[in-house]
Structure formats: C-alpha cells, structure tokens
Amino acid sequence: MTTSKLRVFDIKRFSTHDGIGIRTTVFLKGCPLRCKWCQNPEGLLPTAQVLYMENKCIHCLSCLNASKKQGIEVKDGKICLHREKKEDWNAIVDACPTRALQFDSKEYTIEQLVTEIKKDEAFFKREGGVTVSGGEPFLQPEGLLALLKACHEEKIHTAIETSLFTDSQWLEKALPYLDQIYADCKLFDAKEHKKYTGVDNTLILKNIQLLLQSDKKEHVIIRTPLIPTMTATKENIAAISKFLVSVYPDVHYEILNYNPLAQSKYAYLDMDFCFKENPKLYTKEVMESFYSVAKENGIRNLVIE
Amino acid sequence: MENRIQILKDKMLSQPRYVSIEQALIITRTYKEHEGESAQMKRAYALYNALNELEIGIEPEELIVGNRTKGVRYGVVFPESGISWVDKELETIDSRPQDRFLVRPEDIETFRKEILPYWKGKSLEDVLRQRAGEKIDAISKVVKINQKDHAQGHICPNVAEWLEKGPQGLKEEALHHLETCASDKQDFYRSIVLIMEGVQNFMMRYHDLLLKEAAKTSQHASTMKKVAEICANLSRRPAQTFHEAIQSMWFLFVILHMESNASSFSPGRLDKTLYPYYKKDKEELLINDQEALEIIECLWLKFNQIVYLRNKNSAKYFAGFPIGFNIAVGGVDENGQDFSNELSHLFLTAQEELGLPQPNLSVRLHEHTNEELLRHAVKVVSKGSGMPQFFNDKAIVHELEKLGISHKDALDYAIVGCVELTTQGNNLGWSDAAMFNMNKVLELTLNHGKCLLTGQQLGPDLGSLSTYQSFDALQEAFKQMMLYFIDKMIPCCEEVEKAHIDILPTGFLSSVIDDCMEKGLDVTKGGAHYNLSGIQMIQVANLADSLAAIKQMVYDEKRIEPQALEHALQTNFEHDEVMRQMLLNRVPKYGNDVEWVDELGAKWAQFFRDTLRNYTNYRGGIYHSGMYTVSAHVPMGQNVGASADGRLSQTPLADGGLSAVYGRDLKGPTAVLKSVSRLKDDCTTNGGLLNMKFLPEFFATESGIQKFCNFLRTFVDLEIPHIQFNVVRREDLLAAQKHPEQYSSLTVRVAGYTAYFTELAGDLQNEIIARTSYDNI
C-alpha cells in the first residue's frame, strides 16, 4: 500500500446524489479555483483550518482557557478567532466540549480511507460505491490516484467530481480507475470564467475534450451549476451546449439547480458569501427553460433527476 | 377509492369515543347468576349473554358488519380484569394526557352502584395486588410487569381453521370431546359449546337487523340483504366465498375482543389464508379485483373501529390506542420459496388509499423477495402513513427454530401487536410479559443500589462509580445487579400467569388455538402448542452510550474523575454542563457504526437474553427477549436519573428498541443499519424495532425509490429483524401541533404501530418531531 496521504474535509455516507446507488462521498481539501458561489468554502484552502459553529457554542470559555497566544478572544461576550496566531490549535479544539470548535479536515492514509469507505460495502453490493469530490480532488494527485487504484482493487465502483483544472497527465492516469466522471463546465466565456472562478478555462475545456474523446466518454457527465447572474444565463448554457456537442454529440449534460444551503457554511469561517440576499431554488418552469436552451443547442442526453 | 369507502371512513372518524359499561353490566349480572360455577363457565355464560344482548348497529353502506359496541371506537370497561383503576380514573379519563374517552355521567353512577361493589377484590387487578403487590412494587422502577389488569392478547388465532369449521363445526367438535372426556375437562368443552351457540346467535342478530333496516329503505337495501344472507350462512356453515371469508374472519376478531378485551389479536398472513377463497371466486367470475378491494377496504375500516381502554399509566406506555390487528404479507411459503400474490398487492393498495392506523400492515422481506412487491411496499411507505413496516425472514426464521419452533411453523411466522413475532394459530406467546429497564440497573450499579431520584435503596449496594477500580469491575457489578433484578422479575411474571388461569380462562380463544381442543386445556393453562414469554429490554442505545462514555472518559482517557461524574449524575449535571457536553459530544455513540460502542450494547443485550433462557415460564415454555418500547421510552425515561451518556434526569430514552438515541446518529442511515446489525438476532426473537424517518423528497424520483429498495435489500443482507419509516415533513408536524383539527388524519409511527399524531400527548409529539431525519435530496 502506498504511503500517500490525503487531506479530507468530510466523508459523507448514504450520499444519494453523487452517482448511481448508495455512495460514500470523500471530500478532498483544497481547490485552485475561487468560485464566488463555492458550495464548500471549507474545502478551498489546502491546509487545515479551525471552524467555529456559534450555534453549538455554550460559551463555557474552555477554549479561552486553553489559548496561550491570543488565538481566542472574547469580545462583547462573543468568541472571536484569530486564525493567523501561532497557537496550539490542537489543544484549543480538544478543549471544546461541544465541538463548536473543530478542524475542518483530517489527514488520512489511503488504507484508513479505504477502511472508512468499505464500511458501507454491504450497500454498494447492490449498486453504489465511492465518489471523490472536493475541493478539487486533483489538487492532491498522487494520493487521489492511490485511492482510486485501491478502490478499484477492492472492486468498489468509483466516481469523481472535478473542476478539471488539472494537468492532463493526471486525468489520463486516473481514467482507468474511474467508473463515472462528473466534470464541471461552469462558464464558457473565458473572461467570465476568470472573473467568477479566478482561473482561466483553457485547460478545463481541453480536459473536457480529452474526456469526451476517451473510451470513458459514455461515463462522463458534464455539469453546469446554475448560479443566478453568473452562470445562469441562456447565453452561457447555449455556448457550453454547442461546445460539448461539437466534441461528442452524445455527451451527457446536466444542469444543476442553484443550491441555497451553502450560505450557512460561510459564517463558520468568518467569510462573506457572494449574495447578500440568498437566491431561492429555481422553479420547475425556469429549469425547463434552461433545459430547452440546452436541447436547442444540440444536447441529446440531458440528465434530469 | 370507492364512494362507499369514503362515506364509511368519514362516518367513522367523526364519531366521538365513549367509555362503555354495557358489557360490564352484563358480565356482572351473569356472574351473580352463576355464583357457584367455575371461572371457565362463568366467563362462558358472560360471553354468551353479551353475544345475545349487546346492542348492535350497522351502517347501510357496510359490506362487512360487526362490532362489540354499537358506537365505534368505544372503550369497553371489563370488570373481570380491572376495576379499581376505572373507579379511580373515571372522572379524568376525558382529560388525561393520553388516549382520552368521553364518559356519560349516568354511566359513572351506574358503574359505582351496580358494577364496582361486586368486583372489589375479585378482579384480576385486585387479586394480583393482594397476592403479589409488594413483590411487583419493589421492582417497579426497574421492571414494568404487564398484563396485570387485562387479559392476554398478542395472539394470532388459527384463522384458516376458523374459516374451515365456523362456529357450527367447532361446536360439534367440542360436543364430540364432551362425550368421552374426563370430568375435569367437562367445563372446558361445555364452555366452548355454549359460546359457539352465542356466536351463532350473534351472527343471526346481524342478519335480522340488516333485513329490518333493508325493509325501511330502498337505498343500499340490496347490499344489506346480501350481507344479511352472508351472516345467516356463516351461523350455519363455514365460509365459502371471499366475501364470506372476510366477514367470518371479522366476526372471529370481534368476538375475541368481546371475550378478552385484550390488546392485539392479529389475523397474520391473510394473503396466504384468504387466497383460496379469492382464487375460487375469481375463477368462477364471482368477483373482480375492484370488488375484492372494496371488501378489503371495508374490513380495513373495521380494524379501526375497535380500540382498547387502558389505564392512564398504561396509556403512556402504549399511546395512541394501539390495538394491533397485524397483517403480514409476502415472505416465504412452506418450501422457503418467495411468496406473494394478488391479495398481497390489494392489501398494500388498501393501505395506500386509506392511510389509517389499522391494520398494522407488515411486509416480510427475504433475499428473494420479488421486486414488484418490494417496490409496491416502498411506494406505500412514501405516502407517509408509516406503513408497511418490514420484517426480515433472514434474521427471524432460523432464530425462531432455535426456540424449539418447528421449521414449518417458523417459515410461517406472523406478527402480533406492534412487532412481536409469533407462529400462527398455535401459540400463546405472552409477548408483552414485562419491560426491563437496563438503564435503571446501570444507575443503581453506579450509585450503591440507590435510586437517584428518591434515594431509596432499590437494589444491593455493590459499590459506586468512584469505588470500582476498573471498567471491568464496574461491568461485573452491573452483571450482578442485572441478575438480581431478573431473578426478582420472574416470580412476578409467574404470579400474573397464575392469576390469569384463576380468573380469566378464555374458552373462545382456546377453540382457535391448536392443541387446546385436543388437550381439553384452556390456553391460559398452557393448552397451546407453543408457550413462550417475551420480555423487552429497555434501552440498549442509552446503555451502550453510557457505558462507552464511562469507559472512555473515566477509565481510558481519565479526562473525568469518577467522583466528579458520580456527583454530576447525583445533581443532574446542575453545575457540570461542560462535563455533560463532553459526554455528549466527545464520545462516539451507538448508531454511528463504531464497533466498540455498538458491541457494548450487543454484549449486554446478549447477557440479558442468555440469562432469561435459564428460566421456564409457568406454562412450561421458554422466556425470550425483545427490543422494542412502543412509547415506553418516555415513561421509562422518567424513572431514570441523569445518565453518563449526558442524558438529563427523567428525559426520554431512545425510542424504538434498536434505534439510536434521537439526534445522536450522525452518520446517516447506513451507519445506523451497520450498528444495529451488531446486535445478535437471538436477542430479538420476541421482536425488535428500528425507527427511521425520511422526508418525502427522497421518494420523489424513480432513482430515489430504487435506492430505497436497495437500502432495504441490504437491510435483509445485514440480518436486521425489523425496520419502519416515518415519511413526514417536520413542518407538517409543527403545523399539526398548531392546528390539530386540520390534521386529524395525519398518522405517524409511534413505535410498532401507527397513531393519529394529534391524539398523542404533547411531549410525545415533540419527541417525534425531534427524531433524526435524513434529508439527502
């Protein structure tokens, strides 16, 4: 077994939305993109961070007592974190009785992760498996590859959710061990992409081409998350659709409704969310209109749950 | 749904529930008239007179008739079993927190003048109190002994035989035995002959009433005449058609309730028993599926018309009028092959359309259950009535055989009450003998045998948390304390059985339980082919969590001083909230697939079950165990002080029996199943209960339904005995609390049964709302 390790910010069992059957989703930490709307902001930084969930806090001040270097401060009865301080954050987190303070991630060996994934092996037997998500899984490429290989050896169905912002060689190396690939195509326009995600989309589009021309192309689903005012425009969906169809006419394409639940996570990290007023889910009718745009632009295999 | 069914359903739900003393008056008069006779005969005369005299009623639309009171859902006062509690509670029964009934003021007066004086000191309740009250009280904080003031139910009669023979056939059989039997058996057979004559009269009274009503109006006259003819036929001969079979079966259950006034007589595997009648009618073109469904739905409504009057305390433990007409569909046939048929699906459809609390519909699953049945069952679950619940042949059949049950009978198992397992037609399972609170036992172990709530010395002083030198020493003391209370419990169970023999012989029931007729022995005396006693352990989830917390925090990591925890428990964590949060949040909990924690629960469940097997019950049968609470986790929790799992004093224990403590299962439903699968199936031969709540969104898509089916297939693979689902939105429940009148038909699974949500007491409602739900879509 390999010595690689992976930094994981969540392992969610019984996830029923990230592939076929009943799945365990492993969220790998760290992402090269900075999408304004990021659903998992705790997954952005590649290093461990301390999360503070005020609703779990009983203000017992155990953390303050454990703090030696002003990492914890109490202002007007409120707990404030100074994450930049060189603190013994382990001791502080360990002192919290309610887990209001906790690390957002944990390092696992491949062996440990496989053990964790295999806990639901009995359920995968019918249909299901592991989905690696993030963050961006390819930001920890060696570990990711080792994990996929290990799961493959254990005959566990593997899926990945990726932004495809990675050196193509890693994608090519991972492909033999992947049974299902969910890849995002968030914005087609290069400028817009840079504006809203922080990175250029040339590499992403190249990797989409690579995927859709590979022997795994039937197992690829390209996804666009609808983010009001950003990705959720008819022009964007049309452009993406045209591009995808030009590469592979039978491409599987999914348009994901906006997910308003991410907002609450931002507070745990003292970060600001991109919307002051959190938009609502799109109605069925609006979703239909986006589907129509995709279809009009040549998409034959629209994935609709 | 047919218009007829909607009309009948509306009529039924709009009727108020009253306490009825009608049968009590008949019983009292009969007992006075037959003072010198045996209990067997007195009971038979009382039933005979009730069958002849009780006021009866019909609805013109009904395809199935019969009830034990003219009004629907009346609570019947039954003096032979319990009278003192009725006297005490009559004035408050319309305002008590759980399961209210209206009482007519004139009935209160009649009750005190004509009924009460005769029964003082003679009812089961009073006799038991005189004989064994002290013994039972001494352990009551740990053990709740059941069946103290009512007859034993939880029985699956031999429906097939009843249909084949009818009252005439059984009467002839008893007469035949009477010719040759020993003198001490004569009363037994005489009682059956007398009762069967009463049964025939009862059927004819419906015939007469129906014809009388039909003569008054042209509306529904043909229906009434047809049903009248069926009643007349059944009084003379066995059932021949599907409609007759269902009517006959319903009479059987009405009369079982008239005789015993007990909770839960269950029809069992009706898709198997009724199939020959259905098939014959279909082949002869006497019936189509729509007509069959209408008859089934009429029966389904009937199952909701008999409720059971419990005392206030008992109503807390068994809230929501559970009566437990349990019907099991699917499963395997006598060769172990997958079994289901058109009736299985019609039953599911009836549940889908009606969504009422009764019958308690169960689906038996196994490794080769056909996809069609599973998907239909899941679709019905998604409608949110809490039914059907699922049982697992793979976890159950071989364990029943280990109790000495034959392979054939084990394959043919059914369910009584909520989740209790039984063989059909040959078993007095006494499945609700007692509930044993393991968490109270742990409390006493940690506190010198003294009750944390009252300071009373309830058990031996074996030490306390601060005196046990190791976790092993603590567990050894816990073991001794368990043994102490199990040993005190068994004689109490025996006293109850003895009192039932003396006071409540049941001739009618005995006539439909195998071997009683041949042996000439009443079912209470051990006449049945199988004689089991089931005792429930309460509650393994809290026990595992408490032991895990002590092991990790006190002995392994030494983060908490034993003295400090002992003090915190004694003071209900009054100044120790930080410690309590540590116990709650920093120690893994049962239900999260953490092996060492789950194994702590599994180990003590096994110990309890193994210890019970050392005892033999009064009828010569086996004691075995179950893991379900009905609603008892609330009152049982009230008996337990603060516990090491961070639970505050007197708050509820985990619900269900196999379930995790609500809110503590954080890894989702697959982890819960994995944890539960660590409990051995021989601990739940009397029934296990696992509750889960899903939001309806989960079932909104085809793929959601498919995933749910696969989830259930894995439930079978993991050999978990039982699972049931609440599919409701939290908002629905909150709205129902605010506007109960708008939600009168909202049903939820309380435990092993479904109740009307708005009829549950407020704390139980809150409890249901607080249960974990899994929203993954």
Image: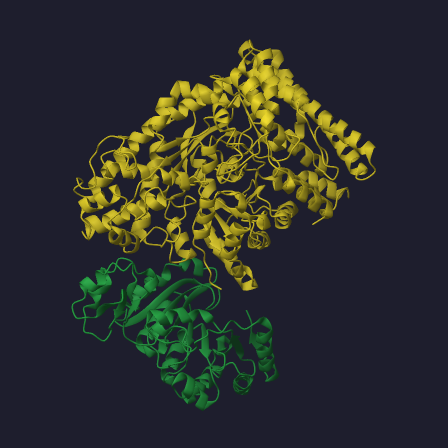
How many labels were placed on the picture? 0
Left or right, B122 with reference to B547:
right
Is A194 placed above or below B460 here? below
* Residue extending furthest toward the front: A76
The x, y position of residue A50, in whole percent, is 27, 69
Q: Position of residue B140 (x, y in %)?
A: 36, 30
x and y percent of residue A220 in the render?
48, 77
Residue that protrudes farthest toward the bottom in the picture: A191
Query: Is B484 placed left or right of B81 in the picture?
Result: left
Q: Nearer the viewer, residue B549 or A55?
A: A55
x then y, percent, for residue A37: 42, 77
Regarding residue B364, the answer to whether it shows in the image is no
Q: Between B242 and B587, which is closer to the camera in this rendering? A: B587
Q: Colour of chain B?
A: yellow
Quarter-of-image position of residue B251: top right
Chain letter corresponding to the colour green: A
x 50%, y 51%: residue: B725
